[in-house]
Amino acid sequence: MTEADAEGYAGLRVERAQELARRHGWASVRVLPPGAAMTMDHREGRLNLAVRDGVVERSWEG
């Protein structure tokens, strides 16, 4: 997966984003609501989804 592959999920409902991410080969999908604590370790193959009100605001690898 590339950085560009990770950035195309903004604006999607979280359920749809998770489904597409798994279909596109992401090994792990982490959903992060506003203010969620998260570890700063980078994991190749993990997609992070910052979600507000059930909609992805930002997505990135790590």
Image (spheres, helix red, strand yellow):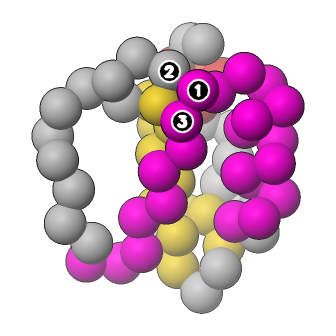
Q: Is residue 53 left or right of residue 31?
A: right
**Secondary structure category for the residue under label 1:** loop
Task: Check disc 1 and report the residue beneath it.
Answer: 27
Does label 3 or label 2 sit earlier along the sequence? Answer: 3
Mark 2 or mark 1, which is nearer the start of the sequence? 1
Residue that carries the numbered disc 3 in the rendered image: 28
Type of the residue with mark 1: Ala
Q: Quadrant of residue 61?
A: top left
Question: Is 30 colored magenta in this rendering?
Answer: yes
Image location (x, y in percent) of residue 20: 82, 41
Q: Nearer the viewer, residue 24 or 7?
A: 24
Residue depicted at x 19% and y 66%:
37
Q: Are marks 3 and 1 in contact (CB under 8 Å)?
A: yes
Query: Which residue is pictured at 52% across the width and 79% down the height?
Result: 52
Which residue is found at the position 77% from the left and 65% from the top?
15
Whether tag 3 and tag 2 are in contact, CB under 8 A, the answer is yes
**Magenta-span inclusion, residue 1:** no
Instruction: Find the distance from the CA under tag 3 to the CA under tag 1.
Output: 4 Å
Query: Residue 18: x percent and y percent?
Result: 71, 51
* Residue found 40% across the figure and 17% down from its top: 44
**Residue 25 at least partly seen:** yes
> Judging from the image, what secondary structure is the residue with disc 3 in?
strand
Task: Magenta stretch: give its range.
Answer: 14-35
Residue 31 in percent (x, y) is at: 49, 60
* Amino acid marked by disc 2: Gly
Answer few, some or many: residues within 10 Å of disc 3's Cα (few below 14, many 20 plus, some between 14 and 19): some
Task: Say few, some or many: other residues with alpha carbon within 10 Å of mark 1 (under 14 / 14 to 19 / 20 or more).
Answer: some
Q: Is residue 49 above or below residue 22?
A: below
* CB under 8 Å between discs 1 and 2: yes
**Residue 45: assigned label:** 2
Number of marks: 3
Circle 2 packing at 10 Å, graded few (<14), some (14-19), many (20+), is: some
